Image: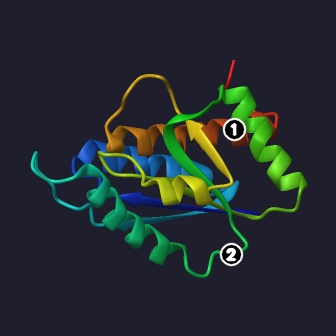
């Protein structure tokens, strides 16, 4: 069974996002073990250097990655490779066929991910050319992983 670790900066604040996450985690439990590690976002204002904020967050992410040397790392990035649902399903299937059973997906904070995290990722993907809140991106990611699992298992969900 695939083990998916999602490392994300920030919490799901609104009840409806937490409920959506709970629903997709329940659905995914038939296909994968999914764990979510929430890290505290760095607070920042207009006077803060965005790269310094990203660097502080990168240290937290790197700390959360300790012990995950065998994991395939995917970073969500606006400049990452765009995937359709079918292509994402294919990519997950390819990883499984390569005997990769641990997958770690990193979702950055509002300023995105530091270059050091992006460089260390095995794959950078974009969920869309549109911009989403990080809470929304988290739920969309879970839904797309679920959709990929349904596609790969020949189940009706994606038409």
Q: Is residue 86 left or right of residue 16?
A: right
Q: Which residue is mark 2?
A: 69
Where residue 17 appears, as percent x and y from the top left, is: 32, 44
Q: Which residue is mark 1?
A: 148
Can I make out residue 156 in this image? no
Q: How is the image coloured?
A: rainbow
Location of the N terminus (image quadrant): bottom right
Where residue 108 appears, as percent x and y from the top left, is: 40, 52
Which residue: 81% across, 52% down?
Answer: 95
Location of the C terminus (image quadrant): top right
Q: How many marks?
A: 2
Which residue: 26% across, 61% down?
Answer: 41
**Above or below: residue 41 compared with residue 110:** below
- In what element is the residue under mark 1? helix
**Above or below: residue 71 compared with residue 10:** below
- Label 1 neighbourhood size at 10 Å, few (<14), some (14-19), many (20+)? many
Front residue of 157/60: it is: 60
Q: Is residue 18 left or right of residue 35?
A: left
Which residue: 28% across, 66% down?
Answer: 40
Location of residue 133 by image quarter: top left
Q: CA distance from mark 2 to mark 1?
A: 24 Å
- In what element is the residue under mark 2? loop
Q: Which mark is residue 71?
A: none
Where residue 30 appears, as percent x and y from the top left, is: 68, 55
- Label 2 neighbourhood size at 10 Å, few (<14), some (14-19), many (20+)? few
Q: Residue furthest bottom?
A: 67
Closer to the N terminus: mark 2 or mark 1?
A: 2
Location of residue 73 by image quarter: bottom right
Between label 2 and label 1, give the one nearer the viewer: 2
Can I make out residue 81 in this image? yes
């Amino acid at each position: 069974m695939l083990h998916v670790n999602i490392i994300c900066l920030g919490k799901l604040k609104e009840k409806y996002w937490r409920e959506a996450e709970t629903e997709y985690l329940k659905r995914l439990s038939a296909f994968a073990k999914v764990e979510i590690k929430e890290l505290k976002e760095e607070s920042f204002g207009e006077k803060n250097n965005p790269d310094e904020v990203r660097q502080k967050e990168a240290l937290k992410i790197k700390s959360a990655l300790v012990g995950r040397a065998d994991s395939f790392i995917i970073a969500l990035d606006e400049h990452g490779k765009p995937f359709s649902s079918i292509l994402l399903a294919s990519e997950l299937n390819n990883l499984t066929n390569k005997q990769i059973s641990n997958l770690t997906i990193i979702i950055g904070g509002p300023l995105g991910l530091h270059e050091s995290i992006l460089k260390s990722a095995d794959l950078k993907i974009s969920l869309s050319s549109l911009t989403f809140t990080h809470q929304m991106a988290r739920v969309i990611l879970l839904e797309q992983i679920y959709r990929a699992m349904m596609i790969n298992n020949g189940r009706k969900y994606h038409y």
